[in-house]
Amino acid sequence: MPEVLKAPLVVEFPFTRSLGPVQSAFLTGLREQVVLGVKTTDGRTLVPPVEYDPVTADELRDLVEVAPTGTVTTWAWNHEPRRGQPLGTPFAWVLVRLDGAGTALLHALDAPGPDAVRTGMRVRIRWAEERTGAITDIACFEPYDGEAEQLTGSYREFEDKVAGIVAPARLDYTYSPGRAQSAYINALSGRRTVGERCPSCRKVYVPPRGACPTCGVATAEQVEVGPAGTVTTFCIVNIKARNLDIEVPYVYAHIALDGADLALHGRIGGIPYDQVRMGLRVEPVWTDGGRYPDHYRPTGEPDADYETYKELL
């Protein structure tokens, strides 16, 4: 039985967004150890605040201060905290209705164990030592047996408001390519490109997926394609990617390998970026020990006629 391939993959990027007046005030308040909510037209106080009433869609701007103490409305115990979560030891995820608020805020509760957590228990905010204007300025909640704070319900302006946030997004997972793509990857290690032919429409798909995307039937017949191909479309990349040692500008293209009915993508090299064109004939360039082509370069052949690749655009 062929080896089942698998590999750990990480998708990670910083998500940057600007803030409107309501979210800006809320995060600026957290930096100053103040929790702000927003009043609705019917008197409810929403925490965290939003810019539009989720019930009436009215625009909301009436900010008010709520207490850093509150009541747990529901909870779930987290036995194994993951990277990036608020606490490094087991804790409870809790929804807390802060005193003066009409909605609950999700955060972590630092408790010695699940037996110490219950719906209805009183808690208060533990502030982070260093605060920057983010939800992480609330380090967590902790049990509290004191009296509720008395607040005026007013709102005071802060200077140097938070105008935007950068939130890192990351997904860690293990990818297994399956039978068809495993055969494709193994063929690449031998500097061959292999697709699969649909038994119904007879089209050859590269990379193969194990089924025809048009007919929906399983594919099994392997067909070697290329190695040369034709540039069908392309783009010029002007922004340098992190951890990618390629100088900009460079060209990334869709390439229809000879014998294939689906274009794959690859980088074009060996030619000035402003000379790459549709119909350019290219061939793969392999590096020592490489498991896939490093890039494609011109073959020197005449450009392909548009009619020969127009269906692959």
Image (spheres, rainbow, N blue to C red):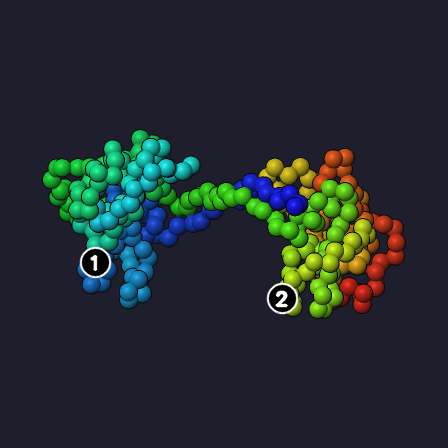
Q: CA distance from mark 1 to mark 2?
A: 52 Å
Q: Residue furthest front?
A: 1
- Is residue 14 visible to the viewer in this orientation of the structure? no
- Is residue 163 visible to the viewer in this orientation of the structure? yes
Say which residue appears at 12% left-offset and 37% top-offset: 146
The 10 Å Cα crowd at callout 1, few under 14, some 14 to 19, many 20 or more, is: some
Instruction: Kindly identify which numbered label has been placed on residue 44.
Output: 1
Q: Amino acid at mark 2?
A: Gly
The mark closer to the camera, 1 or 2, is 2
Q: Amino acid at mark 1?
A: Arg
Q: Is residue 129 left or right of residue 260?
A: left
- CB under 8 Å between callouts 1 and 2? no
Secondary structure of the residue carrying numbered label 2: loop
Secondary structure of the residue carrying numbered label 1: loop
Q: Please identify the quarter of the rendering in which residue 264 is found.
A: bottom right
* Front residue of 267 and 194: 194
Q: Residue furthest left?
A: 147
Instruction: Kindly identify which numbered label has been placed on residue 216.
Output: 2
- Location of the C terminus (image quadrant): bottom right
Say which residue appears at 62% left-offset and 43% top-offset: 5
Q: Position of residue 86 (x, y in %)?
A: 35, 37
The 10 Å Cα crowd at callout 2, few under 14, some 14 to 19, many 20 or more, is: few
Say which residue appears at 40% left-offset and 38% top-offset: 82
The relative height of residue 302 versus residue 112 in the rendered view (above or below) is below
Q: Please identify the quarter of the rendering in which residue 29 is found.
A: top left
Say which residue appears at 65% left-offset and 46% top-offset: 1
Q: Residue furthest right?
A: 301
Q: Is residue 126 left or right of residue 176?
A: left
The relative height of residue 305 versus residue 162 in the rendered view (above or below) is below
Q: Position of residue 23 (x, y in %)?
A: 34, 50
